[in-house]
Image (cartoon, grey):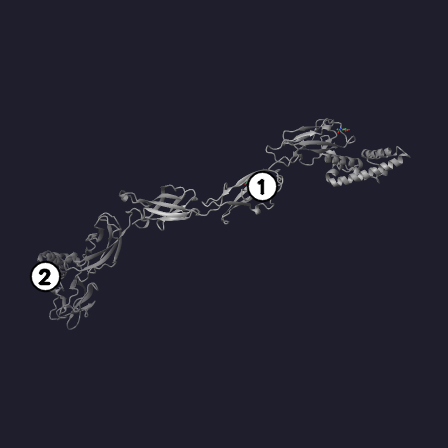
């Protein structure tokens, strides 16, 4: 108590001293209510202060002003005396009048113009207006002439503790992790006090907790709130209400106080492992369920929340690890068991899985509490379903020789009903895949037979679909692709790969290659083609040409001598026998037409008889026969004619024949005579590639045709 009094005195002391120092030389103002205290001050102290003030007040003035003080919130029966104006001027006979003007003069502050006493006539509030600036003046009572220049002074409203602390931002919310150590800072709060923070303790606040112990504590000065218990568990209690008090006057009794509330929420940490709700789960699933279908869900509960409750699910053991998988549903925080591979009731009727749920976000602080995972057993029972027939193979490949006999068995498909009921099966061919009804199938045993003849050279593959139907349930159907490959039989003879035209230069050398020919065969033997070439046996010792087989299965025709000339013979026909390597081999004879041509010295063909081979090539067999018939008819007529003529002039016909030949030769050699231009087209004759002659060439062309025909 004596300590407080001294403190109060000291607080008042400073402004009073300042007032005191204004005494000499002119007006002094004294707060009357404290004048006694003032008077009791030590003279020595006063002298020292006077000295200081003199230094500050450089200018010599009639008025010396200072501050007056008045307590706020004063309410007594009488107006409170604030202070007194006084001048030490010697007025002589004159009477002095004091005048007050400025903030609140006359309304709040009233002056006694004779004595200079200033009274506050209204209750004052420092928190509303802390000081008033007024002007004081001393004038002659009669003349109202100023005796001194006016002087300003201030009346300060002195604070009393009339405001309680207030928490302006309350109520407060804060979060602190559960399981925090003792003394973990939660938040801090602040109260404000409207009272004068520099004067007295009216705004000096001390904080304390009224509610919320023993969980939280507050630092009295800083208002920092901390946990007061270690390891608070969110799963036990999540929210705490803390009531905080702020008290002014440094917390002493008599001070004013304000309170606020703070709601503290414990945030989650991963301090709880997952735990399966059941240790054993039972699921059942039909064997024909589609892959990927969810079979069941297992859930491990976790007291934590958010990501701390998240677990990943795994199948860690069991006899169905290959058939089933488990996926984690982050939303529902459970595990979904799905089918990965087809089930078969007839093979295995139940499976056991060991599933594990493990927390994803582990907090190492709590890992010593044991593994953050749990396991459970899942039993899956497979249910029987009515299944369609199953073929013994997913596809079939059958091979059949193209000469296979009708109704012969090509192959067989088999199928069975996998169900316990084991219905018999009937087979049929999907006719959309066998439009030509090439095959038949025995409905009971699945044997496929040939219905119409095959030709590999027409179609190698016959890909059909066989349908199996359960007799007891016609809706149970399966289909299987059957690829039937037609195998080759040597049923085609080789022949020239194309129509070859061979030219032989008159000036060619013996041994020159006239032509190279290739053969082709529609068949497709396994080891490829190997052709044998030969000349007809009766022409084996052909004096003019020889043949030589090349490495690449082709054949070269060579000239044996150099004595070829168009005059001697223009066209040679060389029949060549080509034989394949089949078993048995097939052969045919193709005839090569070789024409003798005039060539340049470097072997470039210049002039040939084209017609000879154009005719037989261009004409069909029917046309040839027609022509042959015509010729025979012509010959018969000629023979008749000659026979008739022979009686009269025997050598005529021979001479005519020779004449024709001579005519032609003559034109070739001499370029034709004038009288003959009507009989022959000279332009044609002059053209080296043009058509020369008729009859002999016709005959040779026909011979070629006949020879081919014979082949
Ligand atoms: C038939 O099936 C075989 C074997 O699958 C295949 O190689 C062939 O290309 C198929 N043919 C046709 C015409 O579809
Ligand atoms: C060989 O050529 C001569 C004429 O050059 C001909 O008379 C003979 O008939 C030809 N022999 C064969 C077999 O073609």
Residue 37: mark: 2
Q: Residue 109: horizontal and vertical position, in percent?
A: 17, 68
Residue that mark 1 sits on: 449
Is 667 or 462 nearer to us in this picture?
462
Is 87 or 655 nearer to us in this picture?
655
Q: Dividing the image into four equal quarters, which quarter contains ligand 1? A: top right
Q: Of the residues under marks 2 and 1, which one precedes in the sequence?
A: 2
Question: From what the image shows, is residue 139 above or below residue 378?
Answer: below
* Marks 2, 1: nearer the viewer: 1
Question: From what the image shows, is residue 141 above or below residue 697?
Answer: below
Question: From what the image shows, is residue 396 above or below residue 41?
Answer: above
**Drawn side of residue 283 relative to residue 511, left or right:** left
**Drawn side of residue 205 relative to residue 272, left or right:** left
Q: Quadrant of residue 511?
A: top right
At 58% across and 43% down in the image, what residue appears?
440
Q: Residue 283: horizontal and vertical position, in percent?
A: 37, 48
**Drawn side of residue 572 relative to residue 204, left or right:** right
- Quarter of the image for the N terminus: give it: bottom left
Asked whether residue 538 is in view, the answer is yes
Asked whether residue 599 is in view, the answer is no
Q: Residue 175: horizontal and vertical position, in percent?
A: 27, 52
**Drawn side of residue 660 relative to residue 442, left or right:** right
Q: Residue 686: horizontal and vertical position, in percent?
A: 79, 37
Is 416 or 493 nearer to us in this picture?
416
């Amino acid at each position: 108590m004596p300590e407080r009094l001294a403190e109060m005195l000291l607080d008042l002391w400073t402004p009073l001293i300042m007032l005191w120092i204004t005494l000499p030389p002119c007006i002094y103002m004294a707060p009357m209510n404290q004048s006694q205290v003032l008077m009791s001050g030590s003279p020595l102290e006063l002298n020292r202060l006077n000295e200081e003030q003199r230094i500050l007040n450089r200018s010599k003035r009639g008025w010396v002003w200072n501050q007056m003080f008045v307590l706020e919130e004063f309410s007594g029966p009488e107006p409170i005396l604030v202070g007194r104006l006084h001048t030490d001027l010697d007025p002589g006979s004159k009477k002095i009048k004091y005048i007050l003007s400025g903030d609140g003069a006359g309304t709040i502050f009233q002056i006694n113009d004779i004595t200079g006493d200033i009274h506050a006539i209204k209750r004052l509030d420092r928190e509303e207006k802390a000081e008033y600036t007024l002007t004081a003046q001393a004038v002659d009572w009669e003349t109202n002439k100023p005796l001194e220049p006016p002087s300003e002074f201030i009346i300060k409203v002195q604070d009393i503790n009339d405001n309680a602390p207030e928490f302006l931002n309350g109520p407060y919310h804060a979060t602190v992790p559960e399981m925090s150590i003792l003394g973990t800072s939660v938040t801090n709060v602040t109260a404000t006090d409207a009272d004068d923070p520099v004067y007295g303790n009216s705004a000096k606040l001390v904080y304390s907790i009224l509610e919320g112990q023993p969980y939280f504590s507050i630092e009295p000065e800083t208002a920092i709130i901390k946990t007061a218990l270690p390891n608070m568990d969110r799963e036990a209690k999540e929210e705490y209400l803390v009531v905080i008090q702020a008290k002014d006057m440094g917390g002493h009794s008599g001070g004013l106080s304000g309170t606020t509330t703070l709601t503290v929420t414990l945030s989650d940490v991963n301090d709880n492992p997952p735990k399966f709700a059941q240790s054993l789960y039972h699921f059942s699933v039909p064997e024909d369920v589609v892959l990927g279908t969810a079979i069941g869900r297992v859930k491990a509960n976790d007291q934590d929340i958010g990501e701390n409750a998240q677990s990943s699910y795994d199948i860690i053991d069991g006899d169905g690890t290959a058939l089933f998988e488990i996926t984690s549903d982050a939303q529902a925080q459970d595990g979904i068991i799905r089918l990965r591979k087809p089930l078969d009731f007839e093979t295995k009727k139940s499976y056991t899985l060991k599933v594990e749920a493990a927390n994803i976000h582990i907090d190492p602080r709590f890992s010593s509490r044991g593994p953050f995972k749990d396991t459970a057993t899942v039993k899956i029972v497979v249910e029987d379903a009515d299944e369609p027939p199953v073929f013994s193979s997913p596809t079939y490949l059958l091979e059949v020789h193209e000469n296979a006999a009708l109704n012969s068995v090509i192959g067989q498909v088999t199928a069975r009903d996998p169900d316990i009921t084991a219905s018999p099966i009937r087979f049929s061919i999907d006719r959309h895949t066998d439009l030509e009804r090439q095959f038949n199938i025995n409905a009971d045993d699945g044997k496929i037979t040939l219905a119409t003849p095959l030709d590999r050279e027409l179609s190698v593959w016959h890909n059909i679909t066989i349908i199996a139907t359960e007799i007891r349930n016609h809706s149970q159907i399966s289909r299987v692709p059957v690829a039937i490959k037609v195998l080759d039989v040597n049923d085609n003879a080789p022949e020239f790969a194309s129509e070859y035209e061979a030219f032989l230069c008159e000036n060619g050398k013996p041994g020159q290659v006239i032509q190279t020919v290739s053969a082709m065969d529609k068949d497709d033997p396994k080891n490829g083609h190997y052709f044998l070439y030969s000349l007809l046996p009766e022409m084996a010792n052909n004096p003019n040409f020889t043949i030589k087989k090349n490495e690449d299965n082709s054949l070269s025709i060579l000239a044996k001598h150099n004595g070829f000339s168009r005059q001697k013979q223009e066209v040679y026909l060389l029949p060549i026998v080509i034989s394949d390597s089949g078993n048995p081999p097939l052969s045919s004879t193709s005839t090569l037409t070789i024409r003798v041509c005039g060539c340049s010295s470097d072997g470039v063909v210049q002039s040939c008889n084209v017609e000879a081979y154009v005719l037989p090539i261009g004409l069909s067999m029917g046309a040839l026969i027609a022509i042959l018939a015509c010729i025979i008819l012509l010959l018969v007529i000629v023979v008749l004619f000659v026979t008739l003529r022979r009686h009269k002039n025997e050598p005529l016909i021979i001479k005519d024949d020779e004449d024709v030949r001579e005519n032609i030769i003559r034109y070739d050699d001499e370029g034709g005579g004038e009288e003959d231009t009507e009989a022959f087209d000279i332009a044609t004759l002059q053209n080296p590639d043009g058509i020369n002659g008729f009859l002999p060439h016709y005959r040779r062309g026909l011979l070629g045709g006949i020879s081919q025909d014979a082949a």
